[in-house]
Amino acid sequence: MGNEERLTAKQFQQAGGVEDWRVLAFGASAWFVAPSHAAGAALVRRIAELTDELPDVDLRARGVHVRILRLNEASVALAAAISTAARDVGLTADPSALQTVQLAFDVTDRAAVMPFWRTAMAYVQSGDEDLVDPLRRDPSIWFQQQDQPRPLRNRIHLDVSPPYARTPEAAKVLGGPFGVAHADAEGNEADIIPMEPIDELGAESDWRGPFVGTAFYPTASADLVTIVAELADEADFALLVDLRPDGVTIDTGKDQHEDERFPALARRIQEAARGLGLVADPTRVRFVQLGIDAVDVPTVRNFWRTVLGYEYDPRPHVTDIYDPRRLNMPIFFQQMPASEEARRTQRNRIHVDVFVPDDQARARLDAALGAGGRIVYDDEAPAWWTLADPEGNEVDIAVSVGRAEA
């Protein structure tokens, strides 16, 4: 499959049989709506039977997300076959639900900044400008050149729970002990709290926290996915179950492990996995979220909910917004003093990219403008538009289709 001539995003989408699919930042994606984990797992099993080169498959309580990384004639055939399999098991596609949220850092010295984030995120480098999650669950980071330094603190930072112990080697790269407000060589910040065993489940548990409950098992078989789906439905607990060629990640989503149903479900899943002869690998789990400082939190929060197609966290006194399909990172908002005028007016060194289907971009743009956004750059439209929220934090609404031809 990898030896065939690569198709452009436009060529892929114009091929026959792939009407369910859209090309976003990396490869072609489809979302198939399902009424339960078990119904979605039926499609996961069919996908595993279709190919020896497993695509990225994300099972959720209400659907299945599939991503095929390479774009060529063989992947067109695979996408069409997956769509047929979905129809066979009674699932329908919703291309309007698709999007990919990523991060971009403006830097003056890429070589000085990237090692910090490679260690903080436990990512791998792809080419000269990108860091990516090896399991392709968490947002990639693109480091782009900026001409002039912006020395003040960003209004955007990351919270990361990486999958490594509190080692002296990691602390040396990060510039100090784990905790809040680590900064790279140019001042971009991350709060870093490593993944550790969840107290309620015991030190020997397969599960890790603190922001989520998550476990990873190195198997490419759909058997574990099927079992987890049945257990999750039985417990009436929405799980994130992601199948990759090198393993299965099971995740509660942010803060959902605090639900009283979780400990019993976690133990049953662990027992089932060990019954299959699987040994958890805690070095493969991670959590990432984005924090945005704002003076007018409700207004800024509404803009980001709209531009990202997210939903409000319903809990009182929580500022989070989240992807309704829990395929992209959550975002939370922190109160910023209005007196920090200089910091408020400096352009951030970090911004968000959201890749959307080409047939959804205009509607997303109009909705974001209606929520108080403004266009600050559109010379590359319709490839992308750069918008600022009401306080100047930026997001690119981006489209892959047509870029190669342009």
Image (cartoon, rainbow, N blue to C red):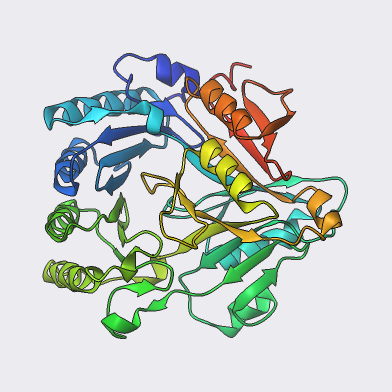
Give coordinates of residue 209: x percent, y percent: 39, 73
User: Residue 87 vs residue 154: left or right?
Assistant: left
User: Residue 142 vs residue 63: left or right?
Assistant: right
Give coordinates of residue 341: x percent, y percent: 84, 55
Vertical side of 354 occupied by 109: above or below: below
Which part of the image, by quadrant, shows the C terminus? top right
Residue 8 appears anywhere in the view: no
Q: Residue shown at 28%/54% (left/top)?
A: 241
Residue 44 appears anywhere in the view: yes
Vertical side of 244 occupied by 55: above or below: above
Give coordinates of residue 131: x percent, y percent: 58, 53
Which part of the image, by quadrant, shows the N terminus? top left
Q: Residue shown at 54%/27% (left/top)?
A: 400
Q: Residue shown at 49%/61% (left/top)?
A: 318
Q: Which residue occupies the extreme front position in the image?
A: 316
Instruction: Depth check: give the residue in front, 276 or 90.
Output: 90
Badge count: 0
Vertical side of 237 occupied by 277: above or below: below
User: Residue 164 vs residue 76: left or right?
Assistant: right
